[in-house]
Image (cartoon, rainbow, N blue to C red):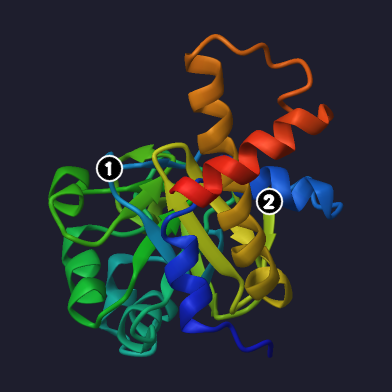
Amino acid sequence: MTQVSNEALKQLATVSTATLTSLLYKKGFRNIFLQGVKPLKSGQRLVGPAFTLRYIPSREDLDGIEVFRDQRHPQRVAVEEIPAGAVLVMDCRGDASVGSAGSILATRIQVRGAAGIVSDGGLRDAQGIAELDMPSYCAGASAPTNLIKHHALDVNVPIGCGGVPIFPGDIMVGDDDGVVCLPAHLVNEVALEALEMERFESFVLEEVRRGVSILGLYPPVDPQTLERYSNWKANQ
Protein backbone atom coordinates (compact mmCIF):
# COMPACT_ATOMS: atom_id res chain seq x y z
CA MET A 1 0.00 0.00 0.00
CA THR A 2 1.08 3.57 -0.63
CA GLN A 3 2.80 5.17 2.34
CA VAL A 4 1.19 8.50 3.20
CA SER A 5 3.54 10.87 5.01
CA ASN A 6 2.61 12.44 8.31
CA GLU A 7 3.54 15.79 6.80
CA ALA A 8 0.95 15.29 4.04
CA LEU A 9 -1.74 14.52 6.64
CA LYS A 10 -0.84 17.67 8.56
CA GLN A 11 -1.06 19.70 5.36
CA LEU A 12 -4.46 18.23 4.49
CA ALA A 13 -5.79 19.26 7.90
CA THR A 14 -5.53 22.89 6.73
CA VAL A 15 -7.05 22.39 3.25
CA SER A 16 -10.73 22.72 2.37
CA THR A 17 -12.71 19.95 0.74
CA ALA A 18 -13.61 22.47 -1.99
CA THR A 19 -9.92 22.82 -2.87
CA LEU A 20 -9.45 19.07 -2.88
CA THR A 21 -12.41 18.41 -5.17
CA SER A 22 -11.06 20.97 -7.66
CA LEU A 23 -7.58 19.48 -7.63
CA LEU A 24 -8.86 15.94 -8.05
CA TYR A 25 -11.14 17.05 -10.87
CA LYS A 26 -8.07 18.35 -12.73
CA LYS A 27 -6.59 14.87 -12.34
CA GLY A 28 -9.70 13.22 -13.75
CA PHE A 29 -11.47 12.26 -10.50
CA ARG A 30 -15.08 13.44 -10.37
CA ASN A 31 -16.67 11.18 -7.76
CA ILE A 32 -14.75 11.75 -4.53
CA PHE A 33 -17.18 13.83 -2.42
CA LEU A 34 -19.52 11.76 -0.25
CA GLN A 35 -23.14 12.68 -0.95
CA GLY A 36 -25.58 13.25 1.89
CA VAL A 37 -22.92 13.04 4.61
CA LYS A 38 -22.72 16.01 6.97
CA PRO A 39 -20.86 16.82 10.22
CA LEU A 40 -22.67 16.39 13.51
CA LYS A 41 -20.84 19.47 14.78
CA SER A 42 -19.40 22.37 12.81
CA GLY A 43 -15.86 23.69 13.15
CA GLN A 44 -14.08 20.33 13.25
CA ARG A 45 -11.55 18.89 10.80
CA LEU A 46 -11.22 15.22 9.88
CA VAL A 47 -8.09 13.63 8.38
CA GLY A 48 -7.08 9.98 8.43
CA PRO A 49 -6.92 6.68 6.56
CA ALA A 50 -10.14 4.76 6.01
CA PHE A 51 -10.86 1.67 8.12
CA THR A 52 -14.09 0.29 6.72
CA LEU A 53 -17.19 -1.56 7.85
CA ARG A 54 -19.68 -2.93 5.31
CA TYR A 55 -23.34 -3.45 6.07
CA ILE A 56 -25.79 -5.35 3.87
CA PRO A 57 -29.57 -5.46 4.41
CA SER A 58 -30.51 -7.29 7.60
CA ARG A 59 -32.44 -10.56 7.76
CA GLU A 60 -34.80 -11.43 10.58
CA ASP A 61 -33.27 -14.84 11.39
CA LEU A 62 -29.73 -13.46 11.49
CA ASP A 63 -30.10 -10.09 13.18
CA GLY A 64 -31.82 -10.52 16.50
CA ILE A 65 -30.57 -8.51 19.47
CA GLU A 66 -28.66 -11.56 20.74
CA VAL A 67 -26.05 -11.25 17.96
CA PHE A 68 -24.26 -8.60 20.01
CA ARG A 69 -23.28 -11.36 22.46
CA ASP A 70 -20.90 -12.64 19.78
CA GLN A 71 -17.52 -11.04 20.37
CA ARG A 72 -16.66 -11.55 16.70
CA HIS A 73 -19.66 -9.56 15.49
CA PRO A 74 -18.17 -7.41 12.69
CA GLN A 75 -19.41 -4.13 14.13
CA ARG A 76 -17.77 -4.92 17.47
CA VAL A 77 -14.62 -6.13 15.72
CA ALA A 78 -14.38 -2.85 13.80
CA VAL A 79 -14.70 -0.83 16.99
CA GLU A 80 -12.08 -2.90 18.83
CA GLU A 81 -9.58 -3.17 15.97
CA ILE A 82 -9.62 0.28 14.37
CA PRO A 83 -6.05 1.61 14.47
CA ALA A 84 -5.16 4.88 16.15
CA GLY A 85 -5.42 7.75 13.68
CA ALA A 86 -7.81 5.89 11.36
CA VAL A 87 -11.36 6.87 10.35
CA LEU A 88 -14.17 4.33 10.70
CA VAL A 89 -16.06 4.54 7.40
CA MET A 90 -19.38 2.68 7.26
CA ASP A 91 -21.25 1.56 4.17
CA CYS A 92 -24.96 1.73 5.02
CA ARG A 93 -26.17 1.91 1.40
CA GLY A 94 -27.34 5.46 2.10
CA ASP A 95 -30.06 4.25 4.50
CA ALA A 96 -30.27 6.66 7.43
CA SER A 97 -33.51 5.26 8.87
CA VAL A 98 -31.57 3.46 11.62
CA GLY A 99 -28.34 4.17 13.50
CA SER A 100 -25.11 2.60 12.25
CA ALA A 101 -23.47 3.22 15.66
CA GLY A 102 -24.22 5.01 18.91
CA SER A 103 -22.45 7.08 21.53
CA ILE A 104 -21.02 4.14 23.49
CA LEU A 105 -19.29 2.68 20.43
CA ALA A 106 -18.23 6.14 19.28
CA THR A 107 -16.71 6.86 22.69
CA ARG A 108 -14.81 3.57 22.55
CA ILE A 109 -13.51 4.51 19.11
CA GLN A 110 -12.34 7.88 20.41
CA VAL A 111 -10.62 6.26 23.40
CA ARG A 112 -8.76 3.96 20.98
CA GLY A 113 -7.34 7.07 19.31
CA ALA A 114 -9.31 6.98 16.08
CA ALA A 115 -9.50 10.14 13.98
CA GLY A 116 -13.27 10.05 13.39
CA ILE A 117 -16.40 8.35 12.07
CA VAL A 118 -18.03 8.62 8.65
CA SER A 119 -21.33 6.92 7.81
CA ASP A 120 -23.76 7.31 4.94
CA GLY A 121 -26.40 6.01 7.34
CA GLY A 122 -27.68 7.37 10.63
CA LEU A 123 -26.01 7.74 14.01
CA ARG A 124 -27.97 7.24 17.22
CA ASP A 125 -27.33 9.22 20.41
CA ALA A 126 -26.21 11.90 17.96
CA GLN A 127 -25.97 14.64 20.56
CA GLY A 128 -23.66 12.54 22.69
CA ILE A 129 -21.46 11.76 19.70
CA ALA A 130 -21.40 15.44 18.73
CA GLU A 131 -20.03 16.28 22.18
CA LEU A 132 -16.97 14.06 21.66
CA ASP A 133 -13.66 15.61 20.62
CA MET A 134 -13.58 13.24 17.64
CA PRO A 135 -15.40 14.50 14.51
CA SER A 136 -18.28 12.42 13.17
CA TYR A 137 -20.16 12.64 9.89
CA CYS A 138 -23.41 10.92 8.90
CA ALA A 139 -26.60 11.24 6.88
CA GLY A 140 -28.64 12.19 9.95
CA ALA A 141 -29.60 11.33 13.51
CA SER A 142 -31.62 8.15 13.87
CA ALA A 143 -32.58 6.35 17.10
CA PRO A 144 -33.45 2.76 15.97
CA THR A 145 -30.77 0.08 16.29
CA ASN A 146 -28.78 -0.88 13.21
CA LEU A 147 -30.07 -4.47 13.41
CA ILE A 148 -33.45 -3.40 12.06
CA LYS A 149 -31.97 -2.57 8.66
CA HIS A 150 -28.27 -3.51 8.64
CA HIS A 151 -26.34 -6.76 8.80
CA ALA A 152 -22.66 -6.09 9.59
CA LEU A 153 -20.66 -8.31 7.26
CA ASP A 154 -17.11 -7.21 6.42
CA VAL A 155 -14.34 -5.24 8.11
CA ASN A 156 -11.67 -3.31 6.21
CA VAL A 157 -12.72 -4.21 2.68
CA PRO A 158 -13.54 -1.93 -0.28
CA ILE A 159 -16.94 -0.30 0.22
CA GLY A 160 -19.20 2.40 -1.14
CA CYS A 161 -20.08 5.30 1.15
CA GLY A 162 -22.12 8.28 0.03
CA GLY A 163 -21.87 6.95 -3.53
CA VAL A 164 -18.05 7.00 -3.48
CA PRO A 165 -15.79 3.94 -3.78
CA ILE A 166 -13.54 3.75 -0.72
CA PHE A 167 -10.62 1.41 -0.29
CA PRO A 168 -8.93 0.74 3.04
CA GLY A 169 -6.11 3.23 3.46
CA ASP A 170 -7.66 5.93 1.28
CA ILE A 171 -7.45 9.25 3.08
CA MET A 172 -10.66 10.80 4.35
CA VAL A 173 -10.71 14.58 4.71
CA GLY A 174 -13.68 16.39 6.24
CA ASP A 175 -14.71 19.95 7.02
CA ASP A 176 -18.02 21.79 7.42
CA ASP A 177 -18.95 21.09 3.77
CA GLY A 178 -18.61 17.33 4.12
CA VAL A 179 -16.11 14.56 3.39
CA VAL A 180 -13.75 13.83 0.49
CA CYS A 181 -12.04 10.49 -0.16
CA LEU A 182 -8.51 10.85 -1.58
CA PRO A 183 -6.99 7.83 -3.33
CA ALA A 184 -3.97 6.95 -1.21
CA HIS A 185 -1.46 6.99 -4.07
CA LEU A 186 -2.25 10.64 -4.81
CA VAL A 187 -2.21 12.04 -1.29
CA ASN A 188 1.42 13.16 -0.98
CA GLU A 189 1.24 14.91 -4.35
CA VAL A 190 -2.17 16.50 -3.76
CA ALA A 191 -1.25 17.80 -0.30
CA LEU A 192 1.55 19.93 -1.74
CA GLU A 193 -0.55 21.20 -4.64
CA ALA A 194 -3.43 22.02 -2.31
CA LEU A 195 -1.31 24.31 -0.16
CA GLU A 196 -0.24 26.35 -3.17
CA MET A 197 -3.80 26.46 -4.49
CA GLU A 198 -5.12 27.76 -1.17
CA ARG A 199 -2.38 30.41 -1.04
CA PHE A 200 -3.36 31.61 -4.48
CA GLU A 201 -7.06 31.67 -3.60
CA SER A 202 -6.30 33.73 -0.47
CA PHE A 203 -4.58 36.22 -2.74
CA VAL A 204 -7.53 36.18 -5.17
CA LEU A 205 -9.99 36.81 -2.34
CA GLU A 206 -8.00 39.84 -1.21
CA GLU A 207 -7.95 41.12 -4.78
CA VAL A 208 -11.72 40.68 -5.17
CA ARG A 209 -12.37 42.44 -1.87
CA ARG A 210 -10.45 45.48 -3.07
CA GLY A 211 -12.55 45.62 -6.26
CA VAL A 212 -10.51 43.68 -8.83
CA SER A 213 -12.52 41.90 -11.55
CA ILE A 214 -12.28 38.11 -11.66
CA LEU A 215 -11.61 38.34 -15.41
CA GLY A 216 -7.94 37.59 -15.90
CA LEU A 217 -7.59 37.01 -12.17
CA TYR A 218 -9.39 33.72 -11.64
CA PRO A 219 -8.01 31.82 -13.51
CA PRO A 220 -4.83 33.96 -13.71
CA VAL A 221 -4.62 34.38 -17.49
CA ASP A 222 -3.47 38.00 -17.16
CA PRO A 223 0.35 38.06 -16.75
CA GLN A 224 0.01 40.98 -14.35
CA THR A 225 -1.99 38.74 -12.02
CA LEU A 226 0.92 36.33 -11.63
CA GLU A 227 3.31 39.23 -11.09
CA ARG A 228 1.09 40.67 -8.33
CA TYR A 229 0.75 37.21 -6.82
CA SER A 230 4.52 36.74 -6.78
CA ASN A 231 4.91 40.06 -4.96
CA TRP A 232 2.10 39.19 -2.58
CA LYS A 233 3.76 35.87 -1.64
CA ALA A 234 7.10 37.62 -1.07
CA ASN A 235 5.43 39.90 1.47
CA GLN A 236 3.62 37.21 3.40
Question: In the rendering, at what x and y percent does residue 197 appear?
Answer: 63, 48
Question: In the rendering, at what x and y percent does residue 112 appear?
Answer: 24, 83
| Residue at 66% from the left image edge and 45% from the top image edge | 21
Badge 1, how many Cα within 10 Å: few under 14, some, many 20+? Answer: few
Question: In the rendering, at what x and y percent does residue 224 appear?
Answer: 75, 29
Decide if residue 178 is on the left or right side of residue 43: right
Residue at the disc numbered 2: 32
Residue at the disc numbered 1: 43
Q: Is residue 162 above or below residue 181?
A: above
Q: Secondary structure at mark 1?
A: loop
Q: Secondary structure at mark 2?
A: loop
Q: CA distance from mark 1 to mark 2?
A: 21 Å
Amino acid type shown at disc 2: Ile
Quarter location, residue 165? bottom right
In front: 88, or 216? 216
Q: Is residue 217 above or below residue 196?
A: above
Quarter location, residue 115? bottom left
Badge 2, how many Cα within 10 Å: few under 14, some, many 20+? Answer: many
| Residue at 58% from the left image edge and 42% from the top image edge | 231
